[in-house]
Amino acid sequence: MTAGAKEAPLLQAEGITKHYHRQLGCAAVDLDLWPGEVLAIVGESGSGKTTLLRVLAGQLAPSAGRCRYRRADGQTVDIYQQSEAERRHLQRKEWGFVFQTPADGLRMNVSAGANVGERLMALGARHYGDIRGSARSWLERLEIDVGRIDERPSAFSGGMRQRLQIARNLVTGPRLLFMDEPTGGLDVSVQARLLDTLRGLVRDMGLSVLLVTHDLGVARLLADRMMVMKEGYVVEQGLTDQILEDPQHAYAQLLVSSILQA
Amino acid sequence: MQAVLKVDDLAKSFTLHLQGGVHLPVLSSASFEVAAGECVVLGGPSGSGKSSILKMIYGTYPAEAGSIQVRRSDDWIELVGAESHEIRALRRDTIGYVSQFLRVIPRVPCLEIVAEPLLVRGRPREVALKRAAELLTRLNLPRRLWDLPPATFSGGEQQRVNIARGFAEPFPLLLLDEPTASLDSENRDAVLTLIEEARQGGAGVLGIFHDAAQSARLASRILDVRDYSDAATFANRDVTEPLQN
């Protein structure tokens, strides 16, 4: 018997390979993500981690391999065998995607409230009062001053923009969140507070998360499990404490030995 | 009593790729069992692999060969080669681990850190916080510290937070790595009492204790870890010393 026998993975990928013309993005990646699990994909820039994330998130069709997702209704679907409309519905309803640069995931010329409300409207919400109420409560959960609900994100600081992008993603109650260097461009103090908020939300909402980061400190704080990538391949994966305390692969040892000791 | 842990022919070595692939053998054939209600103490000099055994059982170090089986209600679960999510599930409800050092989560208050293992198991928040407060009281941690993050606490205070966290949930298997190392005698006694209570509650304990008096008070059996390594491997014993940290 296996310890988690009653459960099944939420996301399963097999043999994911992505080429850009002749250039390799990622190669032969197998991955299972379990409910409530936070998996960090780590490696230096150019290691293929963002390519892998985009393939898994349904944004970039792989050259080979397949990704399956178990929907909230219990049905397992092949992400790239679905129609475009079905895939978009998943992306809006059950998934969220947080970009490193908030401007990529926000609409900069509409208000903060409209940014959060938009995802609800895309799923058919029409009652203005309800939408505004949800937007308000999500701004609060992300510790954004509700008094700024009618301001545009262009008036927000980098950290507040990132919080707004996260609020926009969580308002539809997703089960799976993809994040690409979510704290990448922020000052350390702002980054630290955002990481605290994320930790709390992940636990309270029981979210499953795929997180791309080059920062092992971020992975240590948020992730249950880590995958180390180098030149497109996964060279090692395991529990976060295992990778940090007893890395097996030469590259993983190099990466861990390069962490600055606090 | 029924066994809660079975270790068979367990082996471990380290290969340091950054140091030209130096190979450091630690253990070659560890075999033992721990029964419910028993306290088995791992003895042997520093660097003989005591902590490595605990870390392999907890899944922090991958074992090189052999078998580690843990009882979970009526099943035996093999840990060597287990998937990460299986190990996580066992850490949630079966295996507790208290190390010498608190792995501080920055900016999280002490009381929350202690309550976390209970919250992760889905216990109601009031129950979790009440249990956390009870343990911190027993371990004499001043109440004014409870709402502060432990980063600035003294070594002994941090260690008590760590112990409280480790004992918050009644795990059937407890791994203790020098839990009393930096405590004064009064607090050491409080910890030893917690360990004895856990045993009476049916937990199997596998521990490392740095002083003989504590081992004598707690141990149902003492295993000498040197028996789990072939003599040849230990000719150059001192090179592996830093691995203990």
Image (cartoon, coloured by chain):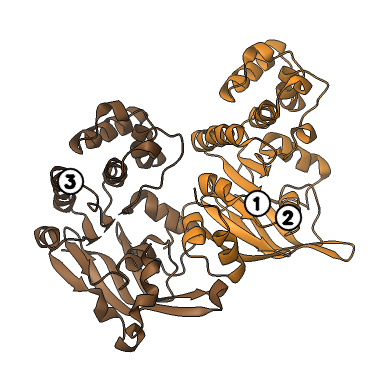
Quadrant where the N terminus of chain A sits is bottom left
Please rate how many residues cluster around mark 1, counting C-alpha atoms within 10 Å: few if below 14, some from 14 to 19, many from 20: many
User: Which one is in front, B200 or B160?
Assistant: B160
User: Which one is in front, A185 or A33?
Assistant: A185
- Identify the image quadrant of residue B160: top left
Identify the amino acid type marked 2. Ser
CB-based contact (under 8 Å), mark 1 and mark 3: no
- The residue under label 2 is A45
Say if residue B116 shows up in the picture.
yes
Marks 2/3: CA–CA distance: 49 Å
Extreme-bottom residue of the structure = B232
Q: Chain of mark 2?
A: A
Q: Is residue B232 left or right of residue A53?
A: left
- The residue under label 3 is B184
- The residue under label 1 is A214
**Residue A138, labelled with which disc?**
none
Q: Position of residue B184 (x, y in %)?
A: 17, 46
Identify the amino acid type marked 1. His
Q: Position of residue A238 (x, y in %)?
A: 53, 61
Please identify which colour was used for chain B in the image.
brown
Residue A71, placed above or below residue A107: below
Residue A64, placed above or below residue A114: below
Q: Position of residue B202 (x, y in %)?
A: 18, 53
Please identify which colour was used for chain A in the image.
orange
Which one is closest to the eye, mark 2 or mark 3? Answer: 3
Co-location on one chain, circles 2 and 3: no
